[in-house]
Image (cartoon, rainbow, N blue to C red):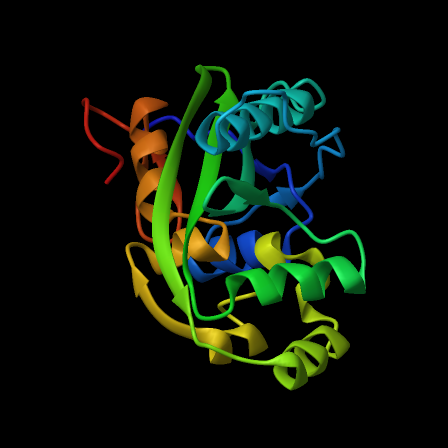
Amino acid sequence: MGPAPPPLVLASGSPRRADVLEALGLSFAVDPAEIPEARREGESPQVFVERLSREKARTVAARHPRSLVLGGDTVVVLDDDVLSKPTDAQDAARMLRQLAGREHVVATGLALAGPHGVESGVDETRVRLRPFGEEAVAAYVASGEPMDKAGAYGIQGKGGALVRGVAGDYFTVMGFPIALFVDLLGRAGLRYAFGRLAVRSEPGDGL
């Protein structure tokens, strides 16, 4: 057997990202970064989510210097508006009214920090929501699901009923683009070995 890869730490309290890692069969610890998530003036959504992902990964990597730390961030982009997590129920309702019947972009950044340094990237997916009115908005907000979701909806939960179609990677909308994660592993000298991580014996794309 070759050398063992570093232990994996998820720098996020997101249940969705934990669910994906568990579905991939990977063992990991959870240590949320808890950093400010304010967008800088003039910062594009893509630069914003990648910067936050890198900052989260670096912050937690400082506490786990021998680990592989995964940070991530997701935003919804509608026209020129960037929709992060709603601040309260009224804010969630406002976002849902904006998104109803329209197409938007979901941008998710991921970053891997560890002994190799930091590797990061961004993936984008287009999503169209169904037309819906105030009754649906009120009922969905009352469910509580929108409150910790970028754009105030979760495609993998009750909010899936609001979605008309997806053009791109479903997992990007969930907040964890698996293809990007595998690519970042390859750039970090690792590979996904279907249920575990392994150190690469030769250059590759993460598989």
Q: Nearer the viewer, residue 204 or 161?
A: 161
- Counting from the top left corner in percent of width and height, residue 108 is at 46, 42
Q: Which residue shows up at 44% across the image and 15% down it?
A: 116
Q: Which residue shows up at 68% across the image and 17% down it?
A: 62
Q: Which residue shows up at 47% across the image and 50% down it?
A: 26
Q: Is residue 52 left or right of residue 112?
A: right
Image quarter for residue 179? top left
Judge whether 48 appears above or below 164 on screen. above
- Counting from the top left corner in percent of width and height, residue 109 is at 47, 36
Q: Nearer the viewer, residue 27 or 88?
A: 88
- Counting from the top left corner in percent of width and height, residue 186 is at 29, 29
> Could one spot residue 181 in this view of the protein?
no
Which quadrant: the N terminus? top left
Judge whether 162 appears above or below 9 on screen. below
Q: Nearer the viewer, residue 75 or 4?
A: 75
> Could one spot residue 59 in this view of the protein?
yes
Image quarter for residue 207? top left
Q: Which residue shows up at 76% across the image and 78% down it?
A: 142
Image quarter for residue 61? top right
Q: Is residue 199 left or right of residue 67?
A: left
